[in-house]
Image: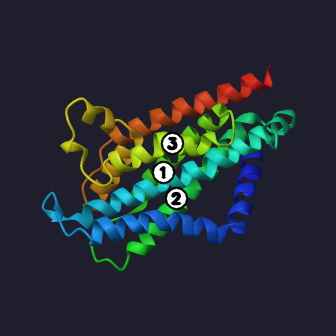
Amino acid sequence: MGIITVLWEKWVEFRRDFYKITVAAMISPLMYLIIFGMGIQTTSHGEPYLHFLIPGIVSMSTMTGSFSAIAQNMSVQRLYEKALDQVMVSPTPLWQYIAGQILGGSLRGLYAGGVILLLTLPIRTDLVFNALSVLILFLNGMVFSTIALTLSFLAKSYTDAPRYTAYIITPMSFLCNTFFSADQMPNGFRQVISLLPLSQTSSMIRSIANEEPPGAFGFIVLLIYLAVFALISTAFIYKKKNL
């Protein structure tokens, strides 16, 4: 019941700000597609660059959509509205509250990715996106929702959320196999970047888009990130309750 309540809150927020959320999900990815994909006529791995770029942009959109849906709102609710304190004294199980936040953020990210897919439909690329692609994008959204939730619990003020975006989300957006292949990076740095969640998501989505098997390694990496940050979030909220 607690999960449904949180999801309903997210749904009400989505309906209220539908146009703002949709436009925000479109602007940056659309600019990247126009500038990098159509403005720069080049190839990647022997194929048009758009074939490489679109899966990366879609993966990035689920990351930014999920993260932004949780990070700032949760920071404000915890620090100023004291909504977290009200949840802790309510009969709602705290794990259900956390699960609802993670699922709600992931659905928002999936929506952002879906918007980009719709925008790229007129472009004839023959790329494949199927149910497995949706599952991977949803899992990626869950990972970044848990990261956002963890960071929002650590935030000291509502201005920390934009800083987290600058420190974490922006570097990942450009480095993690989205605009160019991580294979071109120096040894050591390349291996670290390849283990980041967005790198694995982009690689798996790109493999499926080119009708290749995505492999199990990426799923394992995403599930590890999800488990670690979900445990950190749960530990924080239960520790705060027991103070």
Q: Residues within 10 Å of mark 1 (few under 14, many from 20)?
A: many
Q: Amino acid at mark 1?
A: Met
Q: Earlier in the sequence, mark 1 or mark 3?
A: 1
Q: Is residue 15 above or below residue 158?
A: below
**Distance in Å between CA atoms under marks 3 and 2:** 12 Å
Q: Is residue 187 left or right of residue 106?
A: left
- Judging by the rendered image, the residue that carries numbered circle 1 is 63
Give the mark, 3 or 2, whose residue is nearer the N terminus: 2
Q: Is residue 128 above or below residue 2?
A: below
Mark 1 or mark 3, which is nearer to you? 1
Q: How many marks?
A: 3
Q: Which residue is mark 3?
A: 143
Q: Which mark is residue 110?
A: 2
Secondary structure under tag 2 reads helix
Query: In the structure shown, which secondary structural element does the residue marked by tag 3 occupy?
Result: helix
> How is colour applied across the structure in the image?
rainbow
Q: Position of residue 99 (x, y in %)?
A: 65, 42
Quote the CA–CA distance across marks 1 and 3. Answer: 8 Å
Outermost residue toward the bottom in this view? 122
Q: Extreme left residue here?
A: 46
Q: Nearer the viewer, residue 240 or 42?
A: 42
* Residue at image point 51% right, 62% down: 112
Amino acid type, label 3: Val
First in sequence, mark 2 or 1: give its number.
Answer: 1
